[in-house]
Image (cartoon, rainbow, N blue to C red):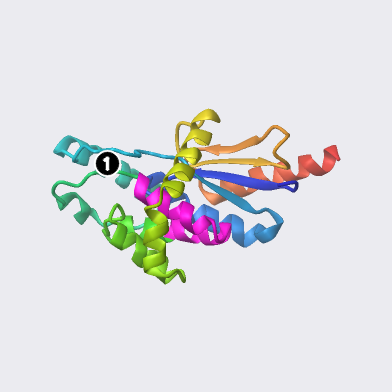
Amino acid sequence: MNKPHLIYFADPMCSWCWGFSPVIDAIQAKYGEQLPIKLIVGGLRPGNQQEMDEPEKADIRGHWQHVHEASNQPFDYNFFNRDHFVYDTEPAARAIVVIRRQSMQLAIQALKEIQHAFYANNIDVTDIKELAAIAEKLGFNKDNFKQELLSEDTKDETWKDFAVTHNSGIRGFPTLIAGVNDDQQYTLITHGFQVSTKIIPILENWQQHLVSTQ
């Protein structure tokens, strides 16, 4: 990509990324195609096989409460009444990858839809059927989506995203970086949650710096 753009490292089952969703909306509302966003799924807990126990539930509940306080995003705490839940973030990330093949903008919309389903509506987005239902809302054929979601190519592409994230030195989400092309060094916009009133001025300063150095 040889124009100013952003790369957003996020995970659909990362609560702070859910908190950051309105910030992504604000960026897109202000800049639109002038500053496109490329989404890379980061891999928060991919392949996890351990059922959540009570201490883990308490820890995650605490994170959710902090995110709500910081962002005012809605959460359904009935999630913590679930038994035998395995917090595996890989299927939801894989769904993003399938949708991204059609459109990056659609992938960003899918990220928001999956987050809303999981956090606000207590829908199990580790369930392939639930992911297919979300994809159908976005215009996908459910059966074709399931087939693509379960393919080895999709799994490989998803884990390549995780590798890109790891090799970039990114260990937490949300992370947003800005650049002009893939050959130049990227500028960190934020590593972690910040509100839009802080992020937008950072982006404006970055753009002004680009103009002054051209």
Q: Residue shown at 68%/59% (left/top)?
A: 33
Instruction: Quadrant for residue 63, please give it.
Output: top left
Instruction: Quadrant for residue 125, please give it.
Output: bottom left
Badge 1 is on which residue? 60
**Mark 1 crowd level (few <14, some 14–19, many ≥20, 10 Å Cα):** some
Residue 130 is at least partly visible in this image: yes
Closer to us: 168 or 155: 155
Q: Residue shown at 59%/44% (left/top)?
A: 7
Q: Residue furthest right?
A: 214
Residue 120 is at least partly visible in this image: no
Task: Indicate the quadrant containing the C terminus: top left, top right, bottom left or bottom right.
Answer: top right
Residue 167 location, x and y as percent?
53, 29
Q: Main secondary structure of the magenta part?
A: helix
Residue 54 location, x and y as percent?
15, 39
Q: Amino acid at mark 1?
A: Ile
Determine whether, in the image, residue 101 is placed left or right of residue 141: right
Residue 46 location, x and y as percent?
35, 39
Region of the chain picked out in magenta, as a range: 90-112
Q: Is residue 98 magenta?
A: yes
Closer to us: 208 or 10: 10
> Is 131 placed above or below 56 here?
below
Residue 114 location, x and y as percent?
38, 58
Q: Residue shown at 49%/31% (left/top)?
A: 166
Q: Residue shown at 28%/38% (left/top)?
A: 48
> Is 147 placed above or below 169 here?
below
Q: Secondary structure at mark 1?
A: helix
Determine whether, in the image, residue 126 is placed left or right of residue 51: right
